[in-house]
Image (cartoon, helix red, strand yellow):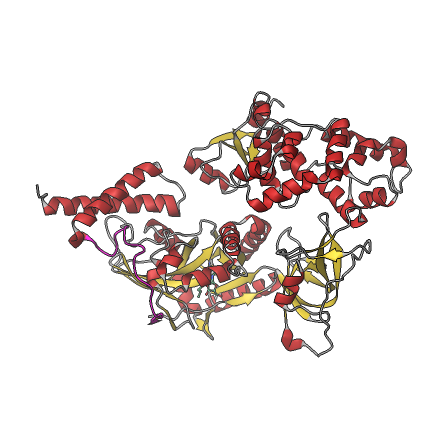
Amino acid sequence: MPEDLEAVRKRVEELREEIRKHDYHYYVLNQPLIPDSEYDKLFRELEELERRYPELVTPDSPTQRVGAPPAEEFRPVRHALPMLSLANCFSEEEFLEWDRRVRRLLGGEAPQYVCEPKLDGVSVELVYQDGVFTVGSTRGDGYVGEDVTRNLRTIKQIPLKLLPINGKLPRLLEVRGEVYMEKEDFKELNRRREAEGEPPFANPRNAAAGSLRQLDPSITASRPLKAFFYAQGRVEGLEIKSQAQLLETLSRLGLPVNPRWKLCSTPEEAIEFYHQLLEAREELPYEADGVVVKVNDFGQREVLGEVSRAPRWAVAFKFPAQEAVTRVRDIVVQVGRTGALTPVALLEPVEVSGVTVSRATLHNEDEVKRKDVRIGDWVVVRRAGEVIPEVVRPLPERRTGQEREFRMPTKCPVCGGPVVRPAGEVAHRCENLSCPARIKESIRHFASRRAADIQGLGEKLVDQLVEKGLVRKISDLYRLRLEDLVALERMAEKSAQNLLRELERSKGMSLARLIYALGIRYVGEHIAEVLAERFSSLDELARASFDELVEIPEIGPRIAQSIVDFFSSAENRQLIRELKEVGIDPRGGAAVAQEAPLAGKTFVFTGRLASLTREEARRLVEERGGKVASSVSRKVDYLVVGEDPGSKLDRARALGIKELSEREFLELVGRS
Ligand code: IVH
């Protein structure tokens, strides 16, 4: 029976409105209003109606994000108003100077400032006509950009139709902002690319730019792009008088706006915002390279005007660079616990994001060749957060001809043993199992925080223990006596006792930690957990065949082979017997279930805990069979909330995840 077309049209519109609202809550606010299954139902109903009534399909329908075939090239688009760039400042003095000039030009009328994070992405302009997204373009040279409408449409955060304010949509809105990629999404994308044999992107900015400039929109759709909007071009049918009002309005229209902005009444407040953001830099989900400070009042902006394509009413207050240029004095080789030889560049000391750097990793020989880094080269080095500084690229234009190419040594620089490069691998290795460098590194790894977590067993001490012949393998640690330790340099009786106590305590480590601590190649923390869930003891794992191992989800042939190789060595089998002798033989899998009150539970922590460190908290969870994750997802059972919680709290609330105070957490683990 034919349905009444008008009734269908009405239902279609209703569904679209409803879906737009849910898209906004889900993608922009991160606060879903309904379960995914409900959303899917609405979406399917709309798809079905549009399939039956193709005449009702409109380009702003939520079903119409992807679908356009690849293009030949990007059409140029002229921006109605030029997209200006920003002047930079690099210190408080420079910022205060900028502030004084603003005040002088305003002639005594005090400005207020809006501070926003300066995102490192690709800047774009979207045009909405009567609320419908019509054209989107890149900044280009500021006057003419490229038409990337079809690609922007695939970004779920970008509304195809704006949400009305008081029932009204602006006649025209040109809005500007940044398309970017979150740091985690970027890493995941690169992992995927490397697994598929494609070259990784150098940084999230390049990844965002590369993803947006795809001729085939379906590729863009598969990339985790996000966007924030923060500026306007032409606007008709909407009166906006200040930056604060603009940000609030954009948000109400359903556009994603970075919530981390602040209205400041003094330059000191802006400086404080800068320091707070700098402090939080590593934890931000995106890369920020500074703070943009903007005069709030649009009337005052008119007075200030612009010079050389940059407005005088805004400034980019930049963070210290995470990259710097310096010279490579030499390239040496370091031997790791698996015997892998890592080339390390010795640098003329240079300051990078506030720390003096004199060494940077070059990963492996292929990397040295691919980047073509030579001894004597000027290079760009990068240091971000806690990660090891690395050489990004050489500056070949500065070469004098005196530079020398690096060669992998044929003998181990530590023990003189032969160096081989196994077929199909990138790393060269020292094959000598008793190479002191390998022993030291494997002991260090065993003792590290996320492995056996033996506090007080630092680098220098490990050196001494190995060099004096007191420790040749992991199990030797548990045979150390007080008199051995006090005989060492700089070892007081008190610290020796503490170390013995730590060693004793470490015997209770979980099976997952023990597996990880052994340093089996390709077995990281996560794989160790998978194995510890599947096997009831180390012995059982040691007996597992290749076929049994590859049956386990997430264990591929490379990992399986590595595990089999590890346990087939007589030396390693002996090690496991000795660990058992000293009392290290934790249970795993089904065997733990009864004694594991938190089995199957996943915890996330946010904010500072008053009575314990994150590592201690992690241990409390793991010892009870639970898991700790670093970010909030639907799989998380509890969010433990400390002081000054971060954005994880908002996300957890949106997903309805149970919150625990520190006290409640301690009660749950039986520590109160
Ligand atoms: S405002 C005329 N706000 O920085 C002022 N720009 O160097 C227009 N950027 O091309 C820009 N975050 O790509 C502004 N919160 C923010 C920003 C921001 C990043 C980028 C933008 C612009 C560049 C200027």
Left or right: residue 137 compared with residue 541: left
617 to 464, vertically: above or below: above
Residue in view at x 30 percent, y 57 percent:
67
- Outermost residue, top direction? 594
Would residue 541 be seen by someone viewing this image from the given angle? yes
Q: Nearer the viewer, residue 400 or 94?
A: 400
Q: Position of residue 121 (x, y in %)?
A: 47, 60
Residue in view at x 69 percent, y 70 percent:
374
Q: Where is residue 110 in the image (x, y as percent from the top left)?
A: 48, 60
Confirm whether the magenta stretch covers residue 64. yes
Q: Quick one: quadrant of the N terminus?
A: top left
Left or right: residue 346 compared with residue 22: right
Q: Nearer the viewer, residue 421 or 199?
A: 421
Q: Which of 223 and 322 is in front in this view?
A: 223
Q: Where is residue 345 in the image (x, y as percent from the top left)?
A: 72, 62
Q: Is the magenta stretch mostly helix, strand or loop?
A: loop
Left or right: residue 255 compared with residue 522: left
Which residues, given as a range, are shown in magenta? 57-77
Would residue 296 be seen by someone viewing this image from the given angle? no
Q: Which quarter of the picture shows residue 511?
A: top right
Q: Nearer the viewer, residue 640 or 474?
A: 474
